[in-house]
Image (cartoon, grey):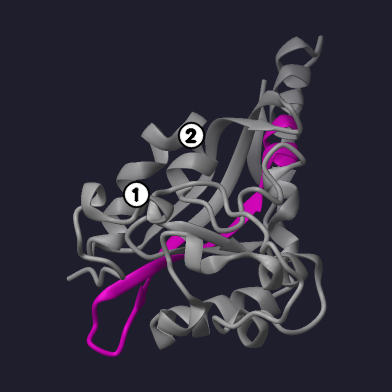
Amino acid sequence: ATARLDDRPADDRPSDAQPHHARPRADAAPAADGAAGLFSGDGEVRAIARALDWAATPLGPVTRWPDALRAAIALCLDSAFPMCVYAGPELVLVYNDAYIPALGASKHPRALGSPARVVWAEVWDAIAPELLGVLAGGPAIHREHGRYLIARDHRTEETHWTYAFSPIRGDDGAVVGVHNVVTETTGHVRAERALRRLLETAPAVMAVYSGPDHVIRYVN
């Protein structure tokens, strides 16, 4: 089962609950919706999150978020490894500082508090089946060197990622979000391609070995 934070049909929800880019609060007063507590501490994302009007996002006020979701987000923010949480039925993005390079200047900080289908519009058709499958209670997903053409730093580029999508379950076992651990492997994939091209054009027989057992990786 999938826990929904708001079971009303999208057309019946208040207009300010529709998916959109998160926006800062109109004032600098301490957050009254629980954001100040959950997002307390150092870091760029925490500071931005404390200033967001979470009540105006599809997730609603932080105090209404399931305990399991808040715990997963706290773990994400404390981690030095790139990770994020896709929260609630709209898969609203909450990420840590280490995840910022994955988004680039064209997406960060607008991505914080925005639905996944908005943030990753250019690859949504590719990742939606995996994310929605996990959200619906399906098995966790693991991919290595997945290829995606993403819009980042104001340009479209070919990128590669090793990542996992895992369910975040509430006390009743219902899925309330998806936890995403990710590392970009674009540099690794490009290096492998360059090595293969070198071997293919070499004038003599060449081979590449790896590991203590000298396993042959490539040979021309």
Residue matched to label 2 = 121
Q: Nearer the viewer, mark 1 or mark 2?
A: 2
Left or right, residue 93 beside residue 188: left
Q: Residue at x 80, y 66 (%)?
A: 44
Residue 21, how many percent across, how many down?
A: 56, 47
Tell me if residue 202 is in the magenta stretch: no
Residue extent of the magenta highlight? 165-190
Front residue of this view, candidates 218 and 133:
133
Residue 50: which quarter of the image?
A: bottom right
Residue 167 is one of the magenta-drawn residues? yes
Please, what is the three-letter code of the amino acid marked with disc 1? Glu
The residue where tag 1 is placed is: 130
Q: CA distance from mark 1 to mark 2?
A: 15 Å
Circle 1/circle 2 CB separation < 8 Å = no
Picture residue at 72% right of the left edge, 40% below the top: 188
* Rendering coords of residue 130 (x, y %): 34, 49
Mark 1: few, some, or many residues within 10 Å (few <14, many ≥20)? Answer: some
First reached walking from the N terminus: tag 1 or tag 2: 2
Is the residue marked by circle 2 packed among few (<14), some (14-19), or many (20+) residues within 10 Å? some
| Residue at x-position 64% and y-position 39% | 217
Residue for point 21% across, 65% down: 7
Which part of the image, by quadrant, shows the C terminus?
top right
Give coordinates of residue 57: x percent, y percent.
48, 59
Residue 212 visible in image: no
Residue lying furthest front in this view? 27
Q: Amino acid at mark 2?
A: Ala
The answer to whether residue 158 is above or below residue 210 is: above
Disc 1 is placed on an element classified as helix
Q: Secondary structure at mark 2?
A: helix
Is any part of residue 141 visible from this angle?
yes
Task: Tell me which corner region of the image, top left, top right, bottom left or bottom right, holds residue 201.
Answer: top right
